[in-house]
Amino acid sequence: MLDGFLLGLHSFTSLAVVAGLLGGVLVGYLVGALPGLSAGVGMALLIPFTFGLDPVVSVVMLVTLYMASEYSGAIPAILVNTPGEPSSAVTALDGYPMRLRGEAGQALTLSILGSAVGSVLSTILLVLTVSWMTKVALAFGPAEYFALAVLGLSLVSTLSGHSVIRGFVALLFGLLLTTIGTDPVDGIPRFAFNDGLLGGIPFIAALIGLFALSEVLVMLETTDEKPAPLKAMSGVLGQFSLLRPHGGNMVRSTLIGYILGVIPGAGATIASLTAYSVQRRISKSPETFGKGNPEGLVAAETANNACMPGALAPMLALGIPGKASTAVLVGALAIHGVQPGPLIFSQHPEVPYSIYVALLLGMPFMVALGLFGSRLWVKLTLIPRGVVAAMVCATCLLGTYAESNDIFSIWIAVAFGIIGYVLQKVEIEPAPIVLALVLGYMMESNFRRALVGSGDDYAVFATSPISLVCLILAVIVFVLPLIGSLMSRQPDTSQAGD
């Protein structure tokens, strides 16, 4: 392993590799900050420019773009409630309320530092456990994925705000939306009145509508409202002290993010939702989550960035891409004649070890850019709300179209913007809808595949240890908040009169 790291470090003696690292970080910042342009899209757009480059330069550029875009999606999520990446929707739950209190600088600082800690610790875990964790990923079949999805949906009470009932209503509405599209087993269209719906509700368009365009409508109602005054920020080095209370939170969220990153299909959005839910349950002030609690922001950002090195584990060790971004990376390596899988460590050792070194060396540059840039980005909060609303609306519609090249996606975003606006008026959180859109299809498709594979034997969900444990945990996570809510509503009769 030491020889491999020395080989990876030697690659960075080349100016071309260093330039690839810096270029990947800068492009990644831009891609992540623009709503609709995910890491996978940014990597796909960059691949044609890597054809004539050395494989190590290409992979370093693409990996650092992937890393930087996972973080920079938090910038618009915090400043204008517009997630640049799908996983940043969880960051917006507490990041945007902090911005409304004038704490935009602190929120941005916590997000970049939490992301850095999650990414570095997860990279170390990747190096130490890459072979073992991929064996765990291979143990997941349809029954296990179904149980994992059910466990994720049971976390709805964490995202429901002050009303669990309203959260369930939003979750059920989101699950109904996941029935739109093509049947996952029979291939029959369901409720798809337009070709753009054959693949289901476009997730990016729905996300942008629920969070960003709905906020635009709210901004237009309050254009005369003055922005909250920005609170003073400490010096760049002094900003590191903000992480002091969050050590345990970051370690837990890193482990959650890495493990869920290794499992193909889970991804950063599920990782950030899970870490956020866990932190809320063990927090001393869970009632402040969703209202600007820094713990929630740190948990979400640490987990979604820790997920990225985890997603590289099955790709490098088995050649299995766990999500769209790693699938693009597999294609880029194939173009250069490098096949990910067990033989990559013996035939092309410079590639995986250059990835490890790039993740570790690129992080300080990304943090420096984030800390120094936050002083510039917070100035956006001082722009009049009407102007910000127009800029956000134009950016969102452009990003929605760029993601799919389909005008129908813009109409979907507008429709969900109106839905999100109505939800705000009736005090229903949109986060459970996002949870359902992420996990609903995964739950239905794997449920039916498990039954097909077992000959319609429902016992398949109980005979698998992983599936059984996930289902038991789902019941516990689902029932305990309901019991606590009912007990808190019971009148206190201990003080009954005499």
Image: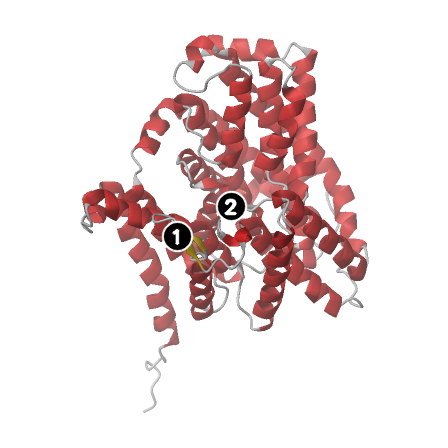
Nearer-N-terminus badge (2/1): 1
Q: Is residue 229 visible?
A: no
Q: Quadrant of the N terminus?
A: top left
Closer to the eye: label 2 or 1: 1
Q: For residue 242, what is the image quadrant?
A: top right
In the image shown, does 314 or 72 lie closer to the viewer? 314
Give SS at disc 1. loop
Residue 171 sits in quarter: bottom left
Residue hosting label 2: 299
Mark identifier at residue 188 = 1
The residue tagged with tag 2: helix, strand or loop?
Answer: helix
- Whether 167 is drawn above or below 55: the answer is below
For image coordinates 55% across by 43% down, the residue present is 301
Residue 299: x percent and y percent?
51, 46
Mark 1 crowdedness (10 Å alpha carbons): few <14, some 14-19, many ≥20 = few
- Residue 125's spot in the image, x, y percent? 44, 27
On the image, the x and y values in percent for residue 30 come to: 70, 37
State left or right for residue 143 relative to residue 204. Answer: left
Q: Amino acid at mark 2?
A: Ala
Residue 159 visible in the picture: yes
Quadrant containing the C terminus is bottom left
| CA distance separating discs 2 and 1 | 40 Å
Whether 127 is drawn above or below 264: the answer is above
The outermost residue toward the bottom is 498
Q: Residue at x 25, y 46 (%)?
A: 452
Q: Amino acid at mark 1?
A: Ile
- The chosen color scheme is secondary structure
Residue name at image x 55 percent, y 19 percent = 335
158 vs 8: above or below = below
Say which of 4 and 320 sits in front.
Answer: 320
